[in-house]
Amino acid sequence: MALCVELGDGISAEVNTRVRALEFLIQAEGLSGIVETVPSFRSLLVYYDPDQIAFEALCAGLGELAEEATTATLPPARLVELPCCYDPELGPDLTAAAERLGLTTDELVRLHAGAEYLVYFVGFTPGLPYMAGVPERIRLPRLQTPRVKVPAGSVGLGGAQYCIYSVESPGGYWLLGRTPVRLYDPEAAEPTLLRPGDRVRMRPIDRAEYDAIAARVAARTYVPVIA
Amino acid sequence: MIRVLDPGPQTTVQDLGRVGQLRYGIPPSGPIDVRAFVIANRLVGNPDGAAGLECTLVGPRFTVEAACAIAVTGAEAPVTINGTPAETWATLALAPGDTVRIAAARAGVRIYVAFAGGLDVPPVLGSRATYLRGRLGGLHGRALKRDDVLRLLPAPLPAPRRAGPGERPTFESEPEIRVVLGPQTDRFTAEGIAAFLGGPYEMLPQSDRMGARLSGPHIAHAQGHDIISDGIALGAIQVPGDGQPIVLLVDRQSTGGYTKIATVGSFDIGRIGQVKPGQRVRFRAVDVAEAHRLRRAWQASLAAAAEGLQRREKVS
């Protein structure tokens, strides 16, 4: 059984922070009967066991916690640095995106890698982060025709949203480059890298470093930089 | 030890699924028909969550290298041991070298095979369930292949049991599936909701463990089919722009951006999961209180089924 708690209407850091704060409060206060929670842009999906908590009591409890769920309640977020190779071969839309924005590719890379992104939530496919924080200057509408296959690790822009494809999947975002780090590795002890609320920065790397890190990732000797 | 001679079209290792990973985008997986899965485990003396097999439309053919006990439940599929017909919904004692064949289902889709002791594959994130799209859990994160070898956890051979006729499912030609309307009912026209509840909807062959795709009366949106992506509950019914419903199941995406007209009650997930491609279903709306009541009745019936099995302990 599940119910959805909506904390706002639009996509904003403020609304999403309240969503994550509500999830944090549920964990911290140990509201009984809650099985698991799924944060997204503006709502929290709450799976519950009706044998442990009555629906009315659950709604009342969640209502109270939602009132408390302000930005002040969350613990400090992690900062994850992801190396990214902005190479037209790995980011097939880099040149076209720069042209459309009236920028050189170097300027686009500098703006993209200069920003800090907030992971609103992780979902759709395992380990895929939905991120905000895209500078106004580099926002683009999504591609007219989505690609059938986007390789894992591709970093993509679509409007104010930014994502990194965690597994090979179809996709409609502009692909600027690729990270050799695996956001989802089913054979790792912790298969997913990013968590809701993480801050993410991209570190531009050249193709040689991309290949070197990819080799270490494959050999399972690479440790991502997390502060 | 079990050697797979022919895996069938899609046979996976499942237990009752992994909890707590949806916030990282990893679905619970586990059996679609929980009732049939649990009864299979109880027939071989296992805890409800022991790992067994879920097969799709056609079961596997396999040999066992040591004496063991199995039970086959779920979809109605003929079972033979060394070519001789064997019972379903009952404990089957196997001798070393026995070959079991589970043929195509005559009714239903998902067949379950429980093994006394349970299948011994390494738990991943607390579960042995296979998540095919994520290549996670089960046997190397994939469906069984020919020549795969499965090991069993040690267990005593169970006393033979049999499920009574009341404990076996009836496969109706047009089952009625109970749903709670929402959470985005306001995004559909009154005619759209009436069409949805009027039905019937036909199960499409591209349905899988992620979602049951249906085709039937067009469900009209009032104001567009996209929403700000949010969490997708088990049984949520998405309606994309084409007006056709998709019931999201155990391997579902954790979040999505299509409007959801209703949610199938957990007690009816197994029933819709047993509907064959080409077969039709209808939806009936119930309120949350009724859904909770139906869930309790479902649990009580499963508990009673366990009692029934115990009473038949000496029969077979």
Image: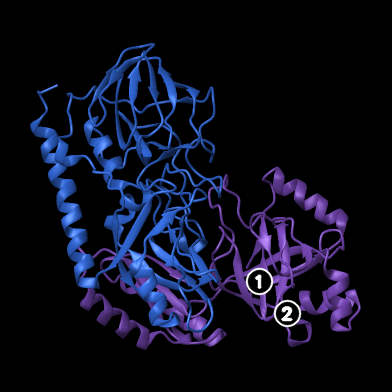
Whether residue B240 sits left or right of residue B64 in the image: it is: right
- Of the image marks 1 and 2, the number of the one nearer the N terminus: 2
Any part of residue A97 in sight: yes
Chain of the residue that carries numbered disc 2 in the rendered image:
A
Whether residue B30 sits left or right of residue A143 in the image: it is: left
The three-letter amino acid code for the residue at tag 2 is Pro
Instruction: Locate residue A54, reporting x and y percent.
Output: 20, 72
Is B275 located above or below residue A129 in the figure?
above
Whether residue B166 sits left or right of residue B231 in the image: it is: left
Numbered label tally? 2
* Chain that is coloured purple in the picture: A
Query: Who's the residue at 29% across and 54% down the image?
Result: B175
Instruction: Locate residue A73, reporting x and y percent.
Output: 43, 82
Q: Which residue is mark 1?
A: A200
Q: Quadrant of the N terminus of chain A?
A: bottom left
Is A8 located above or below residue A29 in the figure?
below
Query: Who's the residue at 78% across and 82% down the image?
Result: A138
Q: Which residue is mark 2?
A: A141
Query: Who's the residue at 28% across and 26% down the image?
Result: B155
Any part of residue B184 in sight: no
Q: Nearer the viewer, mark 1 or mark 2?
A: 2
Q: Element type at marker 2?
A: loop
